[in-house]
Amino acid sequence: MEKIEHERAMDSFRSACKAAGLKVTPQRTIIYNELIASTDHPSIDNLYRRVRKLLPNISFDTVYRTVLTFSQIGIASIVDGYGGSKRFDPNMKPHHHFRCINCQSIIDFYHDEYDNMEIPPDIRERFTVLNKRVQLEGICERCVS
Amino acid sequence: MEKIEHERAMDSFRSACKAAGLKVTPQRTIIYNELIASTDHPSIDNLYRRVRKLLPNISFDTVYRTVLTFSQIGIASIVDGYGGSKRFDPNMKPHHHFRCINCQSIIDFYHDEYDNMEIPPDIRERFTVLNKRVQLEGICERCVS
DNA sequence: ATGTTTGCAAATAGTTTGCATCCAG
DNA sequence: CTGGATGCAAACTATTTGCAAACAT
């Protein structure tokens, strides 16, 4: 990430905090700063270790709560392990998922157009792709009210 | 699921077990049976409660290990919480993920064609879609060897 | 000032492992 | 028979909560 882009990201971080009524604390600033410097989708534990180099007294759960807060105000997203526990699907036919961000229910759907999407050439060259799935996120019909 | 389709699924379950050198035990049979009867992507805890009605003495971790085994031999898949812990992404621009099923690393990639995919009409009518992402799974370049 | 955030600690939830016994092949 | 599978227990990891002190506004 370029320097200018980085500063722009820090600016929009501060705006997002204010918009959400959250204080711009040094902890939050440093955690966000480390998060955007990380390209590897870090776990909280991972992030904690990096942040601690800059802020040795920070506690693990400050990092924990802060990153969860970031995902609530829409400046970061959880890419794995949304809920507490693993969930399973016996349906091995090609299909796709809609996940409700409120009630966490996962709804299967079928859509040929999605099944037929091509793998981008650069990905296909570098990796062996075994599975392809579209994941939609949003609010389900029961949670809209 | 229709009755005939259900029996076909149980047949292919038994074949898959044999092919993988696994024994077709009553526990595995009942767990798989309950799993395909569940359309809600159950957690293990959830499945355990259902299975226990049929097999009151079964232990929680038999269910646990069994379902993990199912996902290893390819007759079920984990749809949430692949690893032990949550992982975060500060990148809020539209992008997609490749996840290595071996080392669990998650690689971002960009692809306009994926960004521009339409939401299926029936989904758009029922739900409020906030986010759309393609998730590819497979083996990454470092893990192929 | 004051209400939010932090750090600490403890509780809870989810996952993994070791091992003796049991049973499907 | 026999090696893999099961049940039990305990360890371990991840997540959540309560609360007093500290801090940003």
Image (cartoon, coloured by chain):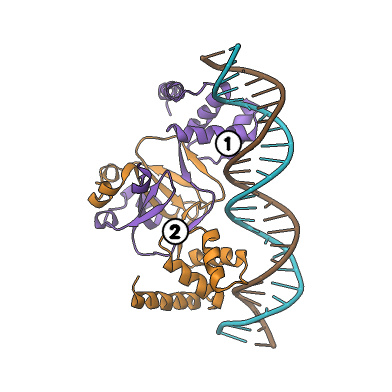
Chain colours: A purple, B orange, C cyan, D brown
Q: CA distance from mark 1 to mark 2?
A: 27 Å
Q: Quadrant of the N terminus of chain B?
A: bottom left
- Residue visible at 43% across and 29% down in the picture: A1
**Which mark, residue A64?**
1
Count of numbered labels shown in the rendering: 2
Q: Amino acid at mark 1?
A: Tyr
> In this view of the protein, can residue A136 be seen by the observer?
no
Question: Is the residue B79 above or below the residue A3 in the image?
Answer: below
Using the rendered view, name the quadrant where residue D2 is placed. bottom right
Q: Chain of mark 1?
A: A
Task: Please state the horizontal and vertical placement of residue A132, each as a whole percent of the image.
Answer: 36, 55
**Near-viewer residue (A62 or A46):** A62
Front residue of A64/A3: it is: A64
The three-letter amino acid code for the residue at tag 2 is: His
Left or right: residue B56 compared with residue A125: right
Label 1 environment density (alpha carbons within 10 Å; few <14, some 14–19, many ≥20): some
Tell me the crowding category of disc 2: few under 14, some 14 to 19, or many 20 or more residues within 10 angstroms, Cα based: many
- Indicate which disc residue A141 carries: none
The residue to which callout 2 is attached is: B41
